[in-house]
Amino acid sequence: MNFFKLVLLAAIIFTSVSCEKLQGKPGVVFLGPVLEVVGEEGKLGYTGKVINNSDQKLKNVLVRYIGKDKDGRIIEAITIPLIGSKGLVILKDEIVDFQFMLRSETINVFSKQLTLDYVE
Amino acid sequence: MYFLKRLIVIVLVQLLIFSFIFTLFVFSFNQRREVSKNQSKALASVIAEQASNYFEENNNNFSSKDFFNFLDDQIGVQKLTNAFNVNPPELLTVYFRSDIMKGIVNAGTDDNLNKDDDSPFNKTNKFFFNNKYVAIKPFFIGTSDMPYGVVRIETSNIPILTEVLYNNGLFYMLLFLILNNQAFLFYLWTKKKKSLDVDTGYLKESSLGSIKIMHKLLGDVIQDHKAPNTKNNKPANVLNIDDKK
C-alpha cells in the first residue's frame, strides 16, 4: 500500500510541477538592445525599439526606467508611454521606437533597469 | 535518540544527493555562460567596427537615433538578438573617450580603455554570484592610436539560470528519485540480519507462553499414549471432537 502511495505522490509531483513557468510568455519585448549614449549635455540618453510579438493588440505599453546609485537608492525613475500607429494601442507585430534622456548626473548612475509594462 | 540518529543520517544522504545534483547544475550553467560570454565579445567587436565606420563619417554630427538606425541598416537589430536567443543584451552602450577622461561617465575601464575586471560597474552580485557579464571593446577612427570610444555590452546571467533549469529540471527530479532509490537499496544491502541464537534470548516473551501451552498439550498426549487403559480419564484441557457427534 505504501508503494502505491509513493507512486501516486511521484505522479502528482511530475504532473503538477512544471518548469514551463520559467519561460516567458510572448508579449511586448525590446527589439534588440537599447542604445545608451552620453548626450551633448553630459546626460545619459536611451534609444530603442519595441515589438509586439503577441497574438493580440496591446494598450498602454510603458517603458519604465529605474536608475540607482552605488548604494542601491533610486535616483531617477522614468515612465515613457509608447505611441504606435493607432495611438496608445500597439498592434500585433508592430514596431515602435522610443527615445528619452535622463536628468541625473551620469556619474551618479550606477545600475540601470529597463522594463516593459502593458495591459492586454 | 535512535530516531534522531536515523533522521540525521537521512538528512546527510539527502544533502549528498542535492550537492551532487547542484554540481551537475553548476557545470551546465557554466558551460552555457561561457557560450554567452563569447557571443557578447563577438557582438562588441562587430558593434565597435560599425561604430568606427559611423563616427568616421559623422564625427561632428552625431545623433543616437541615427547611430541606432545605422546599426539597424548595417547589421539589423533582429540579427543582434537572434544570436542571443536566451539572454539578449539589454543595453548596448557607446561611451566616448573624452567623456570617460573628463569623468562624466564611468565605463568600467582602465586608463587604456580596456575592461577593468575589478570595477564595481562590471559586477552585480545577486543570488550569491555575479549575474552580469560585461564585454568592452574600444573602437578607433582613422589612423589614431588612441581609441575614440568604447562599446560596452551588458548581458544578464539570470535567463541562463532559468533556461538550464527549464531544460534539465525533469532530469534533475528523476536523478533525485533514482539516487534516493539507490540509497535505499544500499541501505537494504548493508542491513545486518539478526542472528538466531536461543541463548541470547531470541524468543520473545509472548512466544514463550504459547510454547508452554504446546508443551503441556504434548505432555498430555504422551501421557495418554503411555496409559491406554485410562481412556475415559480425559484431561480437563483436551477437547475430544468425537464427543460432539
Image (tube, coloured by chain):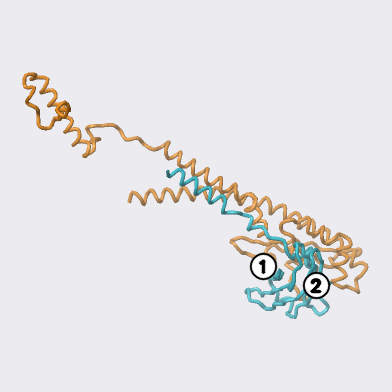
Work out whether B191 lies above or below A105: above
The answer to whether residue B160 shows anywhere in this view is yes
Left or right side of B227 for A44: right
How many other residues sit within 10 Å of disc 1, few (<14), some (14-19) or many (≥20)? few
Q: Which residue is mark 1?
A: B120
Chain identity for the colour cyan used in the image: A
> Element under label 1?
helix
Within 10 Å of the Cα at label 2, are there few (<14), some (14-19), or many (20+) other Cα atoms? Answer: some
- Residue B190 position within the rendered picture, expressed as x and y whole percent measured from the top left: 41, 37
- Subunit of mark 2? A
Mark sitting on residue B34: none
Residue B129 locus on image (x, y percent): 61, 60
Q: Nearer the viewer, residue B10 or B49?
A: B10
Residue assigned mark 2? A98
Residue drawn at (42%, 43%) of the image:
A1
Amino acid type at image mark 2: Phe
Kind of residue indicated by mark 1: Pro
Q: In this figure, what is the number of numbered marks?
A: 2
> Does mark 1 fall on the same chain as mark 2?
no
Which x, y percent locates residue B150? 80, 66
Residues A22 and B146: in front is A22
Q: Residue at x 61, y 64 (%)?
A: B126
As drawn, which residue projects farthest toward the right?
B57
Tell me if residue B170 comes above or below residue A94 in the rendering.
above
Q: Which chain is orange?
A: B
Q: Would you identify the image quadrant in which residue A2 lies? A: top left
Mark 1 belongs to chain: B
Whole-percent x, y for residue B142 in the image? 91, 64
Residue at figure coordinates x 91%, y 67% from the top left: B56
Residue B101 visible, this orientation: no
Is residue B26 toward the left or the right of residue A93 in the image?
Answer: left
